[in-house]
Image (spheres, rainbow, N blue to C red):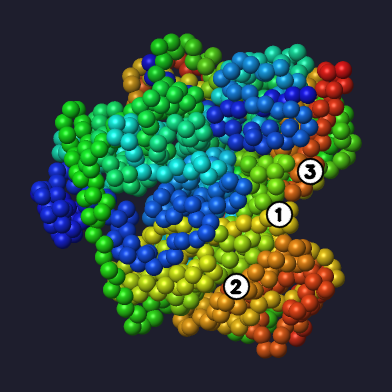
């Protein structure tokens, strides 16, 4: 019965009634499949769209804002950088290699869909504890392999990222992929279809039954054969092919170079349905599509299957009729399949035909604008949501022992075993590789042009957001900005992925609302606009939601890539200073976690005005070379930061901490360890000197740099 | 002099090789489907994932139309440099001895390694001295050099091993730490490390430039003179 | 004619993939496994089976590092079956 089908497809009774009312009739099977996807949380953003309006989206450098395939900012010299972060959490939990790989594939397509050549990828990952969970070790291993496979094969460097391990993510791993692309301003293209009479062309791979999953309840009875049929016919895992996407990418960029396209859109979630609906909606036009033109991988695919297929490596474009010949020639040269499948109309309907019958005929408005938006009903949790982790430090450790335990811990240990599986140098732009500085740095021009560079960082700490969603989310923004300051970059724009539990539960709604407020406040304080982003909800296990995990990716600019900062101490004899107001606390800290403390408590307040001044001071002195090294103080506090500076520089230090400063307390995004000639550090709180082979913190600890390095190197080495 | 860099579907480091070669001479791209070497004095077969590494690395690229011209160019003594995937293609084409197998670790590895120059003479290492240490990155999954023992003995005796990974720097289990080999005549050379990613201190080391400079010096002395 | 070409690494060449599999099986409780090697299977319909050895030498395998074996089946695909009407096998 059709009524039950709507529930099987994930629509509520109210939503179905709304469809009947807006359409004026019952939808047929194909239309129901299309609507169930466009009105899903993933495509429709039903629980988050109203909340996201709180985020600031204006800025002096903004070229493309939220709503396009990717946002973009002006970086000078007629160049634009497009970027976005997206999640692929649920597919990665099912098949981590392909889930992570296709996550990278998808975000790459979003970037070249706006006309920018992808120049860098970063990834932000969350898993359960590797020591405790074989499954989490497996997910980590395969996800990293998948990201490497896709990024390396397509020739886009993976230049940065982060990984956190928390029990909270055991059932719901997170894989967020960020991509940056470069384009001349005039090459940026929008997705809005335009020009009634223009031709709609499908580019790329054949369309198969990938990702149809839930919609399979609509399969016509005759085709569903024996028991094994469903599994065989409808793979739940999308398989990515980076070679196919490499050809597609080069082809699309050449089509844009030759000005053969009116608009371009990638096919992601909900495949052809969402691409066509969004193109039509953005352009205020209609579209007709003839499914018989679509090249299929499987025989006898039903219309609804073709419309909802999530087969990878496909793009949709609109071209003027007189350009189609040249378009097909370019595609043939790149061995990319290109097929005319429809045209733009002057109406406002999306019309789909199959074997000369109209199989779907919907006003575009019903697919996009009529999707219901829900207000969240936030309520602070009445009790602590997350249990205490098991303690690995029992309390009797010396500060030296504590430092070594922190360096060895999964969240702080060296990520070298991971990033050595990624190519960070292809395209010859990378000036700072992973572990060299707090942000990746890439030069924009070729040899002979100026050395303007961009910097990028990705950050987020779910444990701290669990303690205090508003301040924890703000910290993610401040930490990204601090990372950019350490290389001498000024922030231009930000993208974010909100990874949360079930928003229909009041305590998750509260986490989401508070976190968005925190992000907004921090963005406003720094004057950094949100250019786009992504939301992943319902990351929840029977035991409860994941830590609320807003992930922030920030892009900045610096005038001279050759002067980009480094985090390691550079020269014996340099003075070391602690820069910035620093009032750390153990709430939400890594040490609190190792001591078995639940994520509860208020995080330290931020004086945003002062923070902005401090960032500017660090940025200026990194650019001038006055600071020879700069590293922000983040997880593990000042002691871990000092250890990291020693390890990266291969130099020891003798340091005296200001009175009463907690050696392991945290307050991310607002304080820095810098080094340079003593004259350059005038006006800052000098705490010591670089030199020797030992990190000596007076009255606290003394450890050989080699011992620090060994502890840090050991942490992940057994798991990866 | 003019370098030609072959571009296959799936080549990734072609533009990097083009930019590196352009520091030393002129450089053009050679499209895989064209039977045209555009009068270049040296051919570079670059790194990447030509044809998706389908079937075997380099197995399909070696039959690309342009490879007929590259093979003839090599037979006539023209300089051919194969980098990473390029090295794999040249081995498959029989222009270089041996084969490249999966890294012992079974994983892709990116690492800045030191290689030692075994012979500081000839078209590719003439600008170096024997014993020079060059810092150059490797990035590959299939970089373990293999040839039967008797063949390895022969290659070493004939001076065809031009680069070896420095002690402790072998990233992939290559036999006898071999990082790069030439053919008997010395005009074709393949190496797994990426010299085109070591031509500028801004992005790493500049040691790789010596290989391109060697090629230019050779061409100027023997071809253009 | 439906043919299958089994490709395996030449004996004597280090096979880390085979070793990895051999190490992983006991960890899952499967004992008594030795001498594991990992190769490749190529399946194709051919009009002229006599051309298969040349195809193997030229493209489908690298004879320096791989051995190959042709298994032909008169019928169309019989996945997992080793009991197709087998002609004398060609191998190297």
Residue that carries the numbered disc 3 in the rendered image: B206
Question: What is the number of callouts on the image?
Answer: 3
What residue appears at the point 52 percent right and 67 percent down from the top-left corner? A527
Secondary structure, mark 2, is helix
Residue that carries the numbered disc 1 in the rendered image: A560
In the figure, is residue A29 to the left or right of B122? left
Residue that carries the numbered disc 2 in the rendered image: A612
Secondary structure, mark 1, is loop
Q: Are marks 2 and 1 on the same chain?
A: yes
Q: Report if the CB atoms under discs 2 and 3 are less than 8 Å apart.
A: no
Q: Are marks 2 and 3 on the same chain?
A: no
Regarding residue A165, the answer to whether it shows in the image is: no
Mark 1, residues whose alpha carbon is within 10 Å: few (<14), some, or many (≥20)? some
Q: Earlier in the sequence, mark 2 or mark 1?
A: 1
Label 3 – label 1 distance at C-alpha: 19 Å
- Viewer-nearest of discs 2 and 3: 2
User: Residue A445 at x, y = what percent?
Assistant: 66, 44
User: Residue A215 at x, y = what percent?
Assistant: 24, 46
Chain to which mark 1 belongs: A
């Amino acid at each position: 019965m059709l009524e039950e089908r709507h529930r099987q497809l994930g629509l509520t009774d109210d939503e179905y009634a709304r469809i009947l009312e807006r359409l004026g009739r019952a939808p047929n099977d194909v239309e129901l499949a299309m609507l169930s996807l466009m009105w899903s949380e993933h495509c429709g953003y039903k629980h988050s769209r109203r909340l996201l309006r709180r985020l600031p989206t204006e800025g002096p450098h903004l070229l493309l804002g939220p709503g396009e395939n990717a946002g973009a900012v002006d970086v000078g010299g007629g160049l634009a950088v497009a970027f976005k972060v997206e999640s692929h959490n649920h597919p990665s939990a099912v098949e981590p290699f392909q889930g992570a790989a296709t996550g990278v594939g998808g975000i790459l397509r979003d970037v070249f869909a706006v006309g920018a050549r992808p120049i860098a990828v970063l990834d932000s990952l969350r898993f359960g504890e590797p020591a405790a969970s074989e499954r989490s070790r497996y997910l980590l291993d395969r996800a990293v392999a998948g990201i490497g496979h896709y990024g390396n094969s397509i020739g886009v460097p993976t230049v940065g990222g982060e990984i956190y391990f928390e029990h909270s993510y055991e059932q719901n791993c997170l894989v967020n992929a960020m991509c940056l692309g470069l384009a001349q301003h005039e090459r940026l293209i929008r997705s809005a279809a335009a020009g009634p009479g223009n031709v709609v062309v499908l580019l790329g791979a054949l369309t198969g039954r990938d990702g149809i999953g839930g919609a399979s309840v609509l399969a016509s009875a005759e085709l569903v054969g024996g028991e094994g049929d469903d599994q065989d016919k409808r793979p739940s895992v999308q398989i990515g092919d980076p070679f196919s996407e490499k050809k597609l990418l080069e082809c699309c960029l050449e089509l844009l170079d030759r000005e053969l396209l009116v608009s371009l859109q990638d096919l992601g979630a909900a495949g052809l349905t969402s691409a066509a609906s969004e193109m039509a909606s953005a352009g205020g036009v209609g579209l007709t599509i003839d499914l018989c033109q679509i090249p299929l991988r499987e025989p006898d695919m039903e219309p609804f299957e073709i419309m909802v297929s999530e087969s990878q490596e496909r793009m949709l474009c609109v071209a003027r009729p007189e350009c189609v010949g040249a378009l097909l020639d370019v595609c043939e040269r790149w061995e990319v399949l290109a097929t005319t499948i429809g045209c733009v109309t002057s109406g406002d309907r999306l019309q789909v035909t199959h074997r000369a019958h109209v199989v779907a005929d919907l006003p575009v408005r019903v697919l996009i604008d009529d999707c219901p938006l829900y207000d969240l009903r936030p309520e602070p949790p009445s009790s602590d949501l997350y249990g205490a982790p098991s303690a690995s430090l029992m309390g009797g450790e010396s500060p030296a022992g504590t430092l070594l335990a922190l360096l060895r811990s999964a969240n702080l240990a060296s990520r070298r075993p991971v990033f050595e599986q990624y190519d960070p140098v292809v395209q010859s732009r990378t000036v700072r590789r992973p572990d060299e500085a707090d942000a990746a740095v890439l030069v924009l021009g070729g040899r002979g042009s100026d050395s303007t560079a961009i910097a990028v960082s990705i950050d987020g700490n779910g444990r701290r957001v669990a303690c205090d969603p508003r301040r924890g989310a703000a910290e993610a923004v401040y930490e990204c900005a601090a990372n950019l300051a350490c290389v001498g970059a000024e922030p231009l724009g930000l993208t974010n992925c909100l990874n949360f539990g079930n928003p229909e539960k009041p305590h998750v709604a509260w986490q989401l609302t508070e976190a968005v407020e925190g992000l907004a406040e921090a963005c406003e304080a720094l004057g950094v606009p949100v250019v786009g982003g992504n939301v992943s909800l319902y990351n929840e296990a029977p035991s409860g939601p994941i830590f609320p995990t807003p992930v922030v990716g920030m892009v900045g600019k610096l005038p001279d890539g050759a002067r980009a900062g480094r985090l390691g101490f550079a020269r014996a004899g340099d003075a070391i200073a602690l820069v910035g107001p620093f009032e750390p606390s153990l709430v939400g800290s890594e040490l609190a976690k190792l001591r078995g403390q639940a994520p509860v408590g208020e995080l330290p307040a931020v004086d945003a005005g002062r923070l902005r001044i401090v960032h500017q001071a660090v940025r200026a002195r990194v650019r001038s070379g006055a600071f020879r090294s700069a590293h922000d103080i983040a997880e593990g506090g000042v002691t871990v930061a000092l250890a990291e500076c020693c390890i990266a520089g291969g130099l020891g230090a003798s340091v005296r901490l200001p009175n009463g400063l907690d050696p392991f307390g945290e307050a991310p995004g607002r304080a820095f360890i810098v080094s340079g000639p003593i004259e350059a550090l005038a006006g800052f709180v000098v705490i010591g000197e670089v030199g020797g082979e030992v990190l000596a913190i007076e009255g606290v600890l003394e450890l050989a740099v080699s011992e620090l390095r060994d502890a840090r190197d050991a942490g992940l080495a057994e798991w990866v | 002099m003019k370098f030609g860099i072959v571009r296959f579907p799936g080549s990734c480091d072609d533009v990097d090789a083009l930019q590196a070669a352009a520091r030393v001479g002129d450089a053009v791209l050679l499209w895989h489907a064209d039977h045209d070497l555009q009068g270049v004095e040296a051919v570079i077969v670059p790194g990447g994932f030509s044809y998706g590494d389908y079937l075997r690395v380099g197995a399909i690229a070696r039959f690309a139309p342009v490879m007929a011209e590259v093979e003839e160019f090599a037979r006539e003594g023209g300089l051919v440099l194969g980098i990473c995937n390029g090295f794999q293609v040249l081995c498959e084409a029989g222009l270089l001895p041996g084969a490249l197998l999966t890294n012992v670790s079974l994983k892709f590895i990116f690492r800045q390694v030191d290689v030692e120059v075994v012979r500081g003479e000839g078209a590719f290492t003439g600008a170096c001295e024997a014993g020079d240490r060059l810092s150059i990155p490797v990035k590959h999954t299939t970089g373990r050099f293999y040839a039967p023992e008797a063949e390895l003995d022969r290659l070493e005796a004939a001076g065809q091993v031009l680069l070896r990974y420095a002690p402790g720097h072998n990233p992939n289990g290559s036999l006898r730490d071999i990082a790069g080999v030439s053919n008997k005549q010395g005009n074709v050379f393949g190496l797994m490390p990426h010299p085109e990613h070591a031509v500028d201190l801004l992005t790493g080391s500049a040691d790789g430039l010596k290989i391109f400079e060697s090629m230019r010096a050779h061409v100027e002395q023997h071809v253009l003179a | 004619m439906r043919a299958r070409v089994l490709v395996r690494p030449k004996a004597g060449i280090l096979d880390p993939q085979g070793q990895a599999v051999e190490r992983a099986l006991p960890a899952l409780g499967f004992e008594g496994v030795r001498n594991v090697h990992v190769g490749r299977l190529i399946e194709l319909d051919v009009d002229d089976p006599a051309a298969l050895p040349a195809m193997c030498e030229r493209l489908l395998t690298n004879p320096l590092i791989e051995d190959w074996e042709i298994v032909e089946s008169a019928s169309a695909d019989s996945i997992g079956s080793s009991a197709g009407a087998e002609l004398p096998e060609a191998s190297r």
